[in-house]
């Protein structure tokens, strides 16, 4: 692997090579090994073709996009709103109750034009909020800033405050201009801050349910949250809110009344979990519902937290009921998937979580990386104190949160927590991706297209997982490509039923003969081959 690393860097100019060398890491794990440091959450080198998106995408598209009953208005040129409209396949319940709303089928934008760029866009934004209110009478309206908003200096927060007063509904804005921060990750943080400031805590009603949890960082792509909800319901676990798959604003408002936060995608939502713990005393644990074994493990962890035999028994019964179908499906495909090799390059958590599902298929992950995650997602949260804060991260507001004078209520006593910790339960912890990967595997942060093609040519993996921009490049190398963002047209892949879906899909893909027949025209007719010379 060290040689491949050298090869990856060889064609870069010295300065670029030096930077990329810190982001392309040969993994080291073992009893007396420290997981190596990987540079991440830093600017992409201009000119490298990155997989990344922008801050606006992380805020509007990822965190708030799946909430059905907020009118989410993109303040900016129409393309930003249009591209972030349902391309992520976040599903929702239509909510046909009398006071339910579902704005998912709509794309709201101020459709900013030259006129606004020159004279300012606040007036048009105000009109858009009024128009949305008149037409839909929503419970809440949120405004998302795109790059030009910050450049021309529109004050979306003042506009929102004025319209909140005028309309008497919750109206709040996000300064999530695309260029803020180095990737989508900045947008997650901004989204977390504003939703915590403007929504969480507004409704103090404690609802029914003995075991009340929030599921944080699950966005219901391809129906994943539906499958997880099905399992929770069977177990008798009450989901107070999901951030933000299949969500509604009322659920966010009430989320601080839950007794435990479960973090699925650590990267996108750890801020809400931390703030909720500080202000309201709700502890959080990391769970993962990608992979049948991981699902069973996560359910047991939840049962252990609540510490009641009744729940433990029920969870065990559900696992016993669900696992046989999963095991039958994996036994069916495993002779055909065993020993195959995968590569995973996805945003900030799936490159880690999906290794579980590949393990269940007997497949090894040769190389993996995140688009925009931070060192804690790679090396574990224990490195948090050593992460350097640079100008780009300082750019994102860090809210100062204090215990709520009335509502702070630690859910477990210090002794209970100690006892749980002693039994192996980790609170506020995430071990990260690298400690779970093999020694010698290549971990690459913010991979470029050049690096993608080079590792494909070198390793010829049996499957490559990434996003839409990578899909056809990979396929042209004759390698099957699975989108782990949108799931292509498939899913759910979470939970028990999801695992079965995934096994079947990967079996179909890695055993399809079509890729072996694929030859580019210049491979069949050498006279079409040409080499460009530019030196
Ligand atoms: Fe979390 Fe996500 Fe992901 Fe993410 Fe994303 Fe996504 Fe992703 Mo695309 S919140 S980090 S910003 S798990 S949209 S549902 S698939 S890159 S790995
Ligand atoms: C985003 C959304 C995205 C893009 C996926 C892709 C998603 O980052 O803005 O590149 O295919 O999951 O839809 O990550």
Image (cartoon, grey):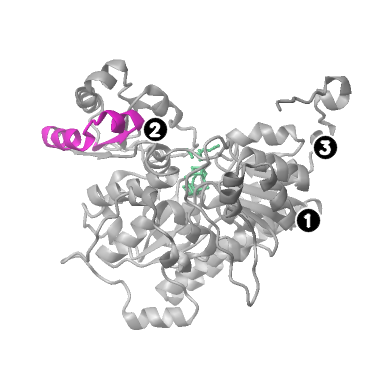
Magenta span of residues: 139-166
Q: Residue at x 13, y 34 (%)?
A: 162
Residue extending furthest toward the front: 535
Based on the picture, tell me whether residue 346 belongs to the magenta stretch.
Answer: no
Q: Position of residue 478 (x, y in %)?
A: 77, 35
Please indicate whether residue 239 sits to the left or right of residue 25 in the image: left
Q: Is disc 3 placed on a helix, strand or loop?
A: helix
Q: With respect to residue 432, does 85 lie above or below?
A: above
Instruction: Give the numbered dot on residue 104.
Output: 2
Instruction: Give the numbered dot on residue 338.
Output: 1
Please indicate whether residue 136 sits to the left or right of residue 366 in the image: left
Q: Do callouts 2 and 3 mark residues in contact (Cβ within 8 Å)?
A: no
The residues bearing labels 2 and 1 have C-alpha atoms spaced at a distance of: 40 Å
The residues bearing labels 1 and 3 have C-alpha atoms spaced at a distance of: 17 Å
Report the residue marked by disc 3.
513
Precedes in sequence: disc 2 or disc 1? 2
Mark 1 Cβ and ligand 1 under 8 Å apart:
no
Q: Is residue 493 visible?
A: no
User: Where is residue 159, by image quadrant?
Assistant: top left
């Amino acid at each position: 692997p060290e040689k491949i690393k050298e090869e990856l860097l060889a064609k870069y100019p010295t300065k670029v090579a030096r930077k990329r060398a810190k982001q392309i890491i040969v993994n080291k794990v073992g009893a007396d090994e420290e997981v190596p440091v990987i540079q991440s959450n830093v600017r992409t080198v201009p000119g490298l073709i990155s997989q990344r998106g922008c801050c606006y995408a992380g805020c509007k598209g990822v965190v708030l996009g799946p909430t059905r009953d907020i009118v989410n208005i993109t303040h900016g040129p129409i393309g930003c709103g249009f591209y972030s409209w349902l391309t992520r396949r976040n599903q929702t319940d239509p909510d046909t109750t009398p006071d339910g709303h579902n704005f998912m089928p709509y794309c709201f934008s101020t459709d900013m034009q030259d006129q606004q760029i020159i004279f300012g866009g606040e007036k048009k934004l105000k009109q858009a909020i009024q128009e949305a209110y008149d037409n839909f009478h929503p419970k809440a309206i949120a405004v998302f800033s795109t790059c030009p908003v910050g450049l021309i200096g529109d004050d979306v927060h003042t506009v929102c405050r004025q319209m909140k007063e005028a309309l008497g509904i919750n109206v709040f804005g996000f300064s999530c201009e695309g260029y803020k921060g180095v990737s989508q990750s900045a947008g997650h943080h901004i989204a977390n801050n504003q939703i915590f400031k403007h929504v969480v805590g507004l409704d103090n009603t404690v609802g029914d349910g003995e075991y009340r949890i929030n599921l944080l960082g699950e966005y219901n792509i391809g129906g994943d949250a539906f499958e997880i909800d099905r399992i929770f319901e069977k177990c008798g676990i009450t989901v107070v809110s999901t951030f933000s798959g299949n969500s509604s604003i009322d659920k966010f408002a009430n989320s601080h009344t839950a007794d435990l936060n479960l973090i699925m995608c650590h990267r996108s939502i750890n801020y809400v979990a931390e703030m909720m713990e500080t202000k309201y005393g709700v502890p959080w644990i990391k769970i993962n519902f990608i992979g049948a074994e991981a699902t069973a493990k996560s359910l047991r962890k939840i049962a252990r937290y609540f510490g009641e035999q009744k729940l433990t028994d029920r969870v065990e019964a559900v696992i016993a009921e669900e696992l046989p179908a999963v095991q039958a499906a994996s036994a069916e495909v495993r002779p055909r998937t065993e020993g195959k090799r995968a590569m995973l390059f996805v945003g900030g958590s799936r490159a880690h979580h999906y290794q579980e599902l590949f393990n269940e298929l007997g497949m090894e992950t040769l190389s993996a990386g995140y688009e925009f995650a931070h060192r804690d997602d790679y090396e574990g949260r224990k490195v948090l104190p050593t992460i350097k804060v640079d100008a780009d991260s300082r750019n994102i507001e860090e809210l100062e949160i204090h215990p709520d004078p009335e509502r702070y209520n630690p859910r477990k006593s210090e002794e209970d927590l100690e006892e749980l910790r002693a039994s192996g339960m980790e609170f506020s912890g995430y071990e990260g991706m690298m400690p779970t990967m093999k020694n010698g595997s290549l971990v690459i942060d913010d991979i470029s297209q050049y690096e993608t093609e080079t590792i494909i040519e070198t390793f010829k993996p049996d499957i490559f997982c990434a996003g839409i921009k990578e899909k056809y490049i990979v396929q042209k190398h004759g390698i099957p490509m699975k989108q782990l963002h949108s799931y292509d047209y498939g899913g759910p892949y979470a939970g028990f039923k999801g695992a079965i879906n995934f096994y079947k899909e990967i079996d179909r893909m890695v055993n399809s003969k079509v890729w072996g027949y694929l030859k580019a025209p210049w491979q069949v007719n050498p006279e079409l081959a040409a080499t460009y010379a530019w030196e």
